[in-house]
Amino acid sequence: MNEDKYIFTLEIEVRDYELDSEGIVNNSIYLHYLEHTRHAFVKQEGIPFGSLTREGLVPVVRRMEIDYRLSLHSGDVMLSRLWIERNGPRFIFHQDIFNKETGELVVAAVVTIVNMENGRINRGDELADRIAKYLEQA
Amino acid sequence: MNEDKYIFTLEIEVRDYELDSEGIVNNSIYLHYLEHTRHAFVKQEGIPFGSLTREGLVPVVRRMEIDYRLSLHSGDVMLSRLWIERNGPRFIFHQDIFNKETGELVVAAVVTIVNMENGRINRGDELADRIAKYLEQA
Amino acid sequence: MNEDKYIFTLEIEVRDYELDSEGIVNNSIYLHYLEHTRHAFVKQEGIPFGSLTREGLVPVVRRMEIDYRLSLHSGDVMLSRLWIERNGPRFIFHQDIFNKETGELVVAAVVTIVNMENGRINRGDELADRIAKYLEQA
Amino acid sequence: MNEDKYIFTLEIEVRDYELDSEGIVNNSIYLHYLEHTRHAFVKQEGIPFGSLTREGLVPVVRRMEIDYRLSLHSGDVMLSRLWIERNGPRFIFHQDIFNKETGELVVAAVVTIVNMENGRINRGDELADRIAKYLEQA
């Protein structure tokens, strides 16, 4: 994975209520961070969440792969970065979270998203047009 | 508070992901338990949540008072009990959570709910009719 | 409640995963915002959370009163403000959350905190010394 | 994946506060269900969570793959099932969640867990002994 591929970076600070009984950020919270990062990205592109490109087109997570490398603790700040690949109707978000202070990779995720329209998978051409400049073709 | 007043009891088991970094159930989780108990109650009465008595009538929490007496830990089972008082349009849920094993009071809450209809407070007569047998008049 | 009393303000942005099935911030999430604000305050004062003033002294929420006035939605930014009153061993955090854009009061909370030390309530003098300049005496 | 492989099944009911703004169970909540199921399994085996076999041995999630097939809604009941494979120090939990009423597969997950001891990966022989009868060798 080439660091140059990243097209978006969001800084997020750990909040104490995100820690679990072991004093580290709970595994499930990373899904929140990853989702929050994707939303911040499409928002930056002027694509309001919930109606990715127009009414009735809904982005849905189909598959998620997450490698948990290191933990985050109270007060840690992370850099949540992503790049996107298109494979037919599937938009594959490569999302990596780094500890800002140490630069170490904390979590590496690959999130596959499709666009649903009236219960069926949409080809995704509208979304692809909107973010064409960022897309790697698979 | 007279124990005989309780009209509904739900048994709930603590799940490990509800613990915070101090190894006890996080304060915010009790709001989930309390809400879950109210939903289970109205469900038992045949009142589906979200449309308390008919389309467009939405129950809304207006005020909450919570006393935190004791903590719950991994594996604990609680008895979540309630009784209801009506004060005009306000339905006041008195909700107490006990540690099932020790019988001790863990959390005592008073939750004030009103029914909203098209953005305005409804008098609540329909709901009152549905649960009349359980209502204490304030 | 005099607006001039506020001694600390934190800006917080709603994240989409904090919305519930009605598309508004879930009631329980406000407890996270309130806790996060208190932690940010003590952090600013150089008091690390978890050991408020020294090892073994643990702040515990004893009682919470929350009035829910308005809702927050996706993308909303809030101003979370607080002032503190001392009443013997009890530290009473008056915490109000405003919609930054409209200036409207969203949530008004009164949170009572005591310091526990080895399972007993501490008089709280150490904490009071640390934040003396901010304390209203009840 | 052969249905006969399952060695443990837990019935879990969706709680309304687990729904997100689209009215379906939020993706991150499935991590809670999966964790809760693993804990229930080791508890049934008499292995208390947190100290899988003895003091100092801590199970850690290293990798997670989740396929989201269908959604769960308010009131749905799921059957959360698992079987386990060992591959050296890695314990691979194959976890599938079914809608109890329809029998349909909702989520299919593969969760890789290692045992950490004093910051290093343990070979996992103790855990393997405890659950030997259930283990598939990879």
Image (cartoon, coloured by chain):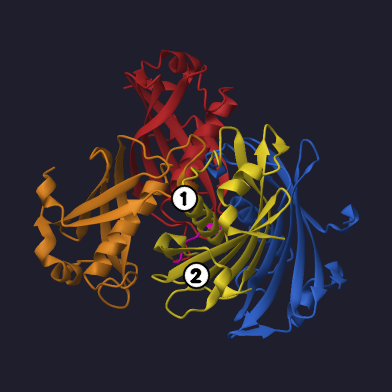
Chain colours: A blue, B orange, C red, D yellow
Image quadrant assignment for residue C70: bottom left
Tell me if mark 1 has few (under 14), some (14-19) or many (20+) residues whose alpha carbon lies within 10 angstroms of its own: some
Judged by depth in the image, the label closer to the viewer, 2 or 1, is 2
Q: Is A119 on the left-hand or right-hand side of C7? A: right
Q: Magenta stretch: give its range.
A: C16-21
Amino acid type shown at disc 1: Ile
Helix or strand or loop: what does disc 1 sit on? helix
Q: Residue at x 49, y 40 (%)?
A: B20
Q: Mark yes or no: residue A25 visible.
A: no
Mark 2 closeness class: few <14, some 14–19, many ≥20 residues within 10 Å: some
Q: Residue at x 30, y 66 (%)?
A: B116
Q: Residue C80 versus residue D92: which sits nearer the camera?
A: D92
Report the Cα–Cα distance between label 2 and label 1: 18 Å
Tag on residue D61? none
- Classify the position of the C terminus of chain D by image quarter: bottom right
Chain containing mark 1: C
- Circle 1 sits on which residue? C29
